[in-house]
Amino acid sequence: MLAPVLIFGYNRPQLFARMAASLKANVNFENHKVFAFIDGPKTAADSNLVSETILEARKLTDNVTVADKNQGLAASIINGVTEIINTFGRAIVIEDDLILHPLFLNFMDFYLDNFEKDSNILSICGFGLKIKRPSDYKSDIYLARRASSWGWGTWADRWNKIDWNVTRFAEIKDSRKLQKEFNRGGSDMFSMLNDYMTGRNNSWAIRFCFHQFLNGYYSVHPFKSLVINDGYNQYATNCRQKYNRFKTDFLNEKETPALCTLPELQPEPLIDSQLRKYHSVSRRIYSKIRRILNI
C-alpha cells in the first residue's frame, strides 16, 4: 500500500494552489490517497483567506478536514498525522508552502519501503541541503542527525513512540554534555527545545528532533533536493523574511533520482560537518540581521 499524502494548510490559498499543482504533476500521484487538514482562522481577518484555502484543498481531494478553531501548526500536524498513520502504517507529510519535484512521491515511496525495517531511521526527507558530496561517497542520499519538516515521511511504529510532552527534558536541561551532543544537529537545537518548554515557541519539529536524538535515530536526505520551500514571505507563520539560509540544489525536472537499496548506508563525518555549518551561530546571526533589515 502506498503511503497516504497529508497536506497541512491555513491561510495561504495561492501557495496552496502552487503546491497542489506540483503535487498533481507527480508521477503516480493518482495512486495515493490525499488528506488535507486546514486550520481554523485566528482572527476574523483570516476567515476569507482560510475559506479560499479550503476551496483550493477541495479541488485537490475530497478528504478535507477543517478545524473548528485555530489549533496552531503543531497540534494540526500531531493530531492529523496520528489519525491517518494508524490506519495506513506510514504517511508522507507536506505543508502548503512547498514546491515538489515530479518524482518526489516516487522517492518517498521507495525509501519508505526500503528503510521500513531499519531501526536506525526515523524519517525520510525529500528536502536536502546544498552540501558537497565526499569524493569517495557513492550514494545519492545521506544520513543526518536532524530531520527536515519540509516534505517528509515516517512509519506508525516510530511516530507513536514520540513523547510530545517531552518528559525527559530535565535530563538535558541539567546536563551541558547532553546539550552539546544535541547541538551536534545544529547550534540552535537545545535553545529551540528550551523555548518550547518555556512557552516561547510551539514547535512540533523540535520535539520530533529531540526524540530522534534520544533514540540515536537518523533521517534520510537526498543530495539533490526534491523539495523547495516557498514560504519565506509576509504570509508565512514561522519564516517571515526574504532571505533563506537553507540553500539547496533542486533536482532538475529532467533528472531522475538514483533509487537503490543501501543496507550499508552509514553516517559520514564530512557530511555531518557541512550540515552543522547551516545551523552554526555565525549563520544564524547573519540570518537574523537579514530578517531585521528585511533583505
Image (tube, helix red, strand yellow):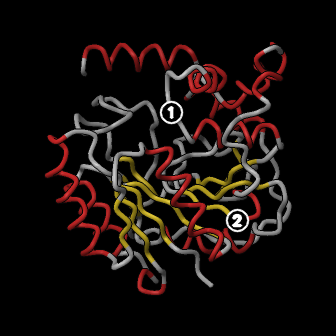
> Foreground: 136 or 25?
25
Q: Amino acid at mark 2?
A: Ala
| Picture quadrant where residue 89 is located | bottom right
Quadrant where the image shows the N terminus: bottom right
Q: Classify 126 as above or below 295.
A: below
Q: Which mark is residue 202?
A: 1
Q: Residue at x 34, y 58 (%)?
A: 38
Q: Earlier in the sequence, mark 1 or mark 2?
A: 2
The kind of residue tagged 1 is Asn
Q: Residue at x 51, y 33 (%)?
A: 202
Crowdedness near tag 1: few (<14), some (14–19) or many (≥20) residues, C-alpha within 10 Å? some
Figure check: 105 above or below 154: below
From the top left corner, tell me how far across and down residue 163 is, in percent.
Answer: 73, 43
Side of 135 relative to 30 (left or right): right
Which mark identifies residue 156? 2
Question: Disc number at residue 39?
Answer: none
For the point 57% across and 41% down, the residue is: 205
Coordinates of residue 147 in the picture (x, y in percent): 63, 45
Q: Position of residue 291 (x, y in %)?
A: 32, 20
> Callout 2: 10 Å neighbours few (<14), some, many (20+)?
some
- Residue located 46% across and 48% down the image: 249
**Position of residue 282 measured from the top left corner of the image (x, y, whole percent):** 52, 14
The image quadrant that residue 172 belongs to is top right
Element carrying mark 2: helix
Q: Secondary structure at mark 1?
A: loop
CA separation, marks 1 and 2?
23 Å
Is 165 on the left-hand or right-hand side of 5?
right
- In depth, the one of 228 and 43 nearer the eye is 43
